Amino acid sequence: MQLLYFFESIRNPVCDFLFSAVTYLGGETVFLALAIAVFWCIDKREGYYIFFTGLFGTLLNQALKLIFKIPRPWVKDPDFTIVESARAEATGYSFPSGHTQNATGTFGAIAAFDYTKRRRLRPVVFLSVLILLVAVSRMYLGVHTPLDVSVSFAIALILVFALRPFFTDEKRFRGAMPYFALAGWLFSGALVLYTHLLPDGAADAANLASARSNSLALHGAAIGIAFTWVLDSRWLDFRVGGRWYARVAELLIGLGAVLLLKAGLKVPAEFLCFGNAGVARVVRYFLVVAFAGVIYPLAFPWFAKWECTPLDRFGTWVASLFSRKKQDGKEGPAAGESKNF
């Protein structure tokens, strides 16, 4: 708690605002948006990699919370205060940190993919800084201890490196995907059974309710990604492509539709499931993932055909500026050298 008390002593409105903003980078919405953006617009295989890294990490995270049942810092020490704006997101037990898990798994997977493909260090450094900032934000806000964030970081990093070899080429990817899809379905189903078979007194009521709700969402998402992979590999097989502005439009429209669907399906799903909120949650998350993976990509051929000459010219102009700078940097004389001999 000493480090948390140190962060408490240096809090101020500016840092409170900044770290409250940074911490959202480890939230569910950012993970979902980045995984979908990569899946739709950059590399489909990398999208699956990010999703499974996050899925397996979150499943383990939720199980550990219920096994260890470590309360939040302000519950363990009533004299300790937190930044109040962070309280609403701090549901469930404290150990391990879900936000740190999400940030490390998501940004770590993107960094590993980028470095494998291009051998560039700058994106790796930038993404590593984001992971560190999210971890620090959880402690600064007072919702997690150093043990919470360090264990989450270690688990997510292990998953990033353990899963990476299966997504390096198309042959390995296609061979591994049936097992990943099955594992996601089985592990998420096991978490649903574990959380719902626990008697009500086995854990704090609010924490147990949070674990049950999260397990149902994860199970629905796992079924959705398995459904997506089966249909995409055997029938849809959509291609990532199109002009840059078409992909931007494709992404913005699609993300808006996904977020609206995620929020708007709650009441209809419960109605169709005869008021059973648990089953409705599974159905809702399944439909959101299925929409993102199967239904919306049906519109991609239309986006790929979209042409806009002014935007094409703008893109060519920007590309020429960067290529000119790169060429000047390579061909110009080294610093301190004279052009005259």
Image (tube, grey):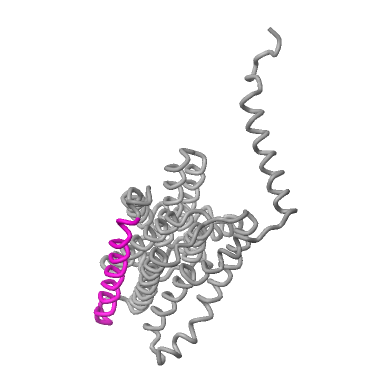
Q: Is residue 199 magenta?
A: yes
Q: Image quarter for residue 60?
A: bottom left
Q: Nearer the viewer, residue 144 or 292?
A: 292
Q: Is residue 153 above or below residue 58?
A: above
Residue 246 shows up from this direction: yes
Q: Residue at x 41, y 71 (%)?
A: 91
* Residue 215 higher or lower than 279, as above or below: above
Q: Please say whether residue 5 is visible from this viewpoint.
A: no
Residue at 50% in and 57% down: 38
- What's the magenta region? 174-202
Instruction: Name the residue rendered at 45%, 66% in the picture.
Output: 236
Whether 293 is drawn above or below 241: the answer is below
Q: Magenta stretch mostly in which secondary structure?
A: helix
Q: Residue furthest bottom?
A: 274
Q: Is residue 9 magenta?
A: no
Residue toward you, 326 or 189: 326
Residue 156 found in image quarter: bottom left
User: Percent position (x, y) of residue 291?
Assistant: 48, 72
> Where is the C terminus found, in terms of image quarters?
top right
Question: Image height check: is 268 above or below 233?
Answer: below
Q: Residue 222 placed where, x, y %?
A: 36, 69
